[in-house]
């Protein structure tokens, strides 16, 4: 290669390297711009001041007055005339200042809330206004406005108030809590320790925290939340309410960086229920359930690790009407997967009353779907007795048989009375359990009623024995018993032992 040709190649290579460097630089600038854009959209602003100015007028302090009535000092006995030391006793009574009944005392408490429309509807926690005789909403300029309770719910700790003279008031918008991510910045405004509008900021530390509520999975935040912040809003950086500050975790009662907020998507739905009905109407299925454990799945020959297994169906319930049976494993409710009993309870409760819902189940190892028309959960919802007839026979020894260390007997009136077994519980009674047996180690005790074996109902000792024999013939190591004991119906995997 000539010198000229070598120089020419070097020149061309240099131009190519220069062009490549330029493209890389442009890409880096573009990536940086995208990064800045994302930071502006989701990250912490240079200052929270603009958000505070915009949102704080709609955040209110809530003052409640409660009348406390309690017993006074115990009334001292009267001394009959003529008794010794009667004068000294009367003098003692006078010094004690005897009271028949204590004077009512008025206690005042403070919390937080926020206005959700210009008509003056205010959202707060139920525990902020519970048992209050008077409720006053204090807006930013210090004006005090009387309010009344529209509806409240202790299970979700939500309450909706209405400012009596509310008109053209500032309000805030709901956000989509499902779009909130762990690590997103959030801001809390409230009334900690009665100090008035205070602002704190932090991030979402975790989601879906089951903190003492069946119906809500909370947002966890490290934005400082203290006593008095209850009922106040948790804002995202778009100025939308993504949570309602409701609880703190603290050994001392002060902020330690772990606070919990009700997600806005749950709160918004429940608040609409309170506004329309004055209470929260929850969906009802009418069953008792338990998780599908590895032992339960193994005893049924199933390779699943999720779902909820039905123990018992209440009479006159949506489940009964739809044909759901004890032993059914619920895998999905209205298209949503069911991981455990908690998720099923939540999904059912969130379902509109009267809505037809597709329920995916496993029954006898087969997958199928059933349509259930959701009922309304009542606080005192219980199963009703169907007054089934008792057997007139007594527990003769000839009627009993030992199966897997359990002495079984037909269920009859004598056993129902002895073990307090309700009339609507049917099956085979256990009257004795060998302490060396697998049944005893599994927790089975006398007074237990076997209702089903491997999801099939049993009404006689023969049926129990045959179904256990069939499981052994199939090579199973255990059988699944549905049993009733002291008012509770549960599934128990029973390991099989050679007899």
Image (tube, rainbow, N blue to C red):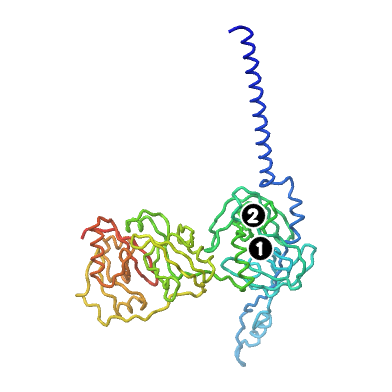
Foreground pick, 382 / 19: 19
Residues packed near mark 1 inside 10 Å, few (<14), some (14 to 19) or many (20 plus): many
Q: Mark on residue 255? A: 2
Q: Position of residue 53 (x, y in %)?
A: 77, 55
Q: Which residue does the image show at 73% across and 50% down from the upper left?
A: 48
Give how far apart the Cα atoms at labels 2 and 1 are.
Answer: 16 Å
Task: Find disc 1 in the rendering and name its residue.
Answer: 231
Foreground pick, 260 / 99: 260
Q: Position of residue 133 (x, y in %)?
A: 68, 75
Marker count (numbered): 2
Q: Which residue does the image show at 29% across and 80% down from the upper left?
A: 414
Foreground pick, 447 / 145: 145
**Quadrant holding the N terminus:** top right
Secondary structure beneath label 2 = loop
Vertical placement of 114 versus 257: above or below? Answer: below
Secondary structure beneath label 1 = loop
Point out the frontmost of discs 2 and 1.
Answer: 1
Q: Is residue 12 left or right of residue 59?
A: left
Q: Earlier in the sequence, mark 2 or mark 1?
A: 1
Vertical placement of 196 versus 13: above or below? Answer: below
């Amino acid at each position: 290669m000539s010198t000229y040709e070598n120089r020419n190649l070097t020149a061309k290579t240099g131009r190519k390297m220069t062009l490549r460097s330029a493209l890389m630089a442009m890409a880096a600038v573009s990536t940086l711009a995208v990064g800045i854009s994302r930071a502006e959209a989701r990250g912490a602003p240079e200052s929270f001041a603009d958000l505070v100015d915009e949102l704080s007028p709609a955040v209110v302090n809530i003052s409640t007055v409660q009348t406390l009535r309690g017993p006074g000092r115990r009334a001292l006995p009267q001394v009959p005339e003529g008794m010794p030391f009667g004068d000294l006793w009367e003098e003692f009574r006078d010094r004690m200042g005897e009271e028949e009944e204590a004077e009512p005392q008025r206690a005042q408490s403070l919390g937080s809330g926020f206005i959700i429309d210009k008509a003056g509807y205010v959202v707060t926690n139920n525990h902020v206004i519970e048992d209050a005789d008077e409720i006053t909403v204090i807006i930013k300029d210090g004006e005090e406005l009387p309010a009344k309770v529209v509806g409240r719910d202790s299970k979700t700790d939500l309450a909706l108030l209405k400012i009596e003279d509310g008109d053209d008031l500032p309000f805030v918008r709901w956000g989509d809590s499902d779009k909130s991510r762990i690590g997103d910045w959030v801001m809390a405004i409230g009334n900690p320790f009665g100090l008035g509008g205070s602002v704190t900021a932090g991030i979402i530390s975790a989601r879906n925290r089951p903190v003492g509520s069946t119906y809500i999975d909370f947002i966890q935040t490290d934005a400082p939340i203290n006593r008095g912040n209850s009922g106040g809003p948790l804002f995202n950086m778009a100025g939308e309410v993504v949570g309602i500050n409701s609880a703190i975790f603290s050994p001392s009662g002060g902020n330690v960086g772990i606070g919990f907020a009700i997600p806005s998507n749950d709160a918004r739905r429940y608040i609409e229920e309170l506004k329309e009905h004055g209470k929260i109407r929850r969906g009802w299925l009418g069953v008792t359930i338990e998780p599908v454990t590895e032992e339960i799945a193994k005893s049924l020959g199933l390779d699943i690790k999720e779902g909820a297994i039905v123990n018992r169906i209440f009479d006159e319930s949506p489940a009964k009407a739809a044909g759901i049976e004890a032993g059914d494993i619920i895998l999905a409710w209205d298209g949503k997967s069911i991981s455990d009993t908690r998720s099923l309870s939540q999904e059912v409760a969130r379902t509109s009353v009267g809505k037809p819902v597709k329920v995916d189940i496993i029954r006898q190892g087969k997958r199928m779907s059933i349509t259930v028309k959701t009922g309304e959960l009542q606080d005192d919802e219980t199963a009703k007795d169907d007054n089934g007839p008792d057997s007139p026979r007594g527990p003769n020894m000839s009627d009993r048989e030992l199966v897997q260390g359990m002495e079984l007997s037909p269920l009859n009136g004598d056993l129902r009375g002895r073990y307090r077994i309700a009339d609507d519980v049917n099956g085979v009674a256990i009257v004795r359990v060998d302490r060396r047996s697998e049944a005893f180690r599994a927790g089975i005790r006398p007074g237990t009623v076997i209702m089903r074996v491997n999801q099939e109902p049993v009404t006689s000792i023969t049926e129990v024995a045959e179904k256990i024999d069939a499981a052994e013939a199939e090579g199973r190591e255990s059988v699944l018993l549905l049993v009733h004991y002291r008012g509770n119906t549960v599934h128990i995997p029973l390991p099989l032992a050679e007899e």
